[in-house]
Image: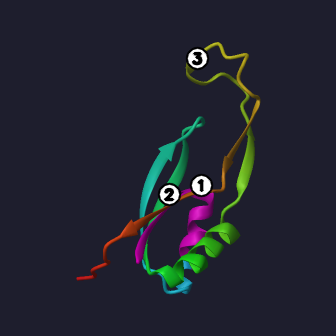
Amino acid sequence: MAKLLIAVVHAEDAGALRDALRNAELRITEMPSRGGFLQAGSMMVFIGLEDDQLGLAMRLIEENCRSRTHRVVEPMGGMKATWLPTEVTQGGATVFVLPLDEIRRI
């Protein structure tokens, strides 16, 4: 069964991941996004895959995306937030894998 893989990756990892996926001859679509606690830049990568390609795609994501720790030096948005952590981990990748009835390339 075909799959739709959606990976949300840190903007700093997007270029290396894009190159790795394309070098593996996987067809991708990218869309810039922003979110999370720090409203950091990220990239959403959409890949239509067959079952036998899923392992390769996941391995490339794991090899090219990493987590980072950022220090939060002042409250965001002017709010009093002494309860907030001073270090926040972000990055890596969040991956969604959805079943598809078919992939049709026109």
Q: Please say if the residues under marks 3 and 1 sit with CB atoms less than 8 Å apart.
A: no
Residue 23 horizontal/vertical position (percent): 55, 85
For the residue marked with disc 1, what is the amino acid?
His
The residue under label 3 is which amino acid type?
Answer: Gly
Residue under the image location 59 percent in, 15 percent down: 79
Local packing at callout 2 (Cα closer than 10 Å; few below 14, some 14-19, many 20+) is: many
Name the front one of labels 3 and 1: 1
Mark 2 = which residue? 43
Label 3 residue SS: helix
Q: Residues within 10 Å of mark 1 (few under 14, many from 20)?
A: many
Numbered mark located on residue 92 in the image = none
Measured in 3D between alpha carbons, the distance from the residue under mark 3 to the one under mark 1, in whole angstroms, is: 25 Å
Q: Residue at x 52, y 84 (%)?
A: 52
Q: Earlier in the sequence, mark 1 or mark 2?
A: 1
Look at the numbered discs 1 and 2 and tell me whether their residues touch, using CB distance below 8 Å.
Answer: yes
Residue that label 1 marks: 10
Secondary structure beneath dot 1 equals: strand
First in sequence: mark 3 vs mark 2: 2
Label 2 amino acid? Met
17 in the magenta segment: yes
7 left or right of 58 in image: left
Looking at the image, what colour scheme do you see?
rainbow
The residue depicted at 59 percent of the width and 55 percent of the height is 10
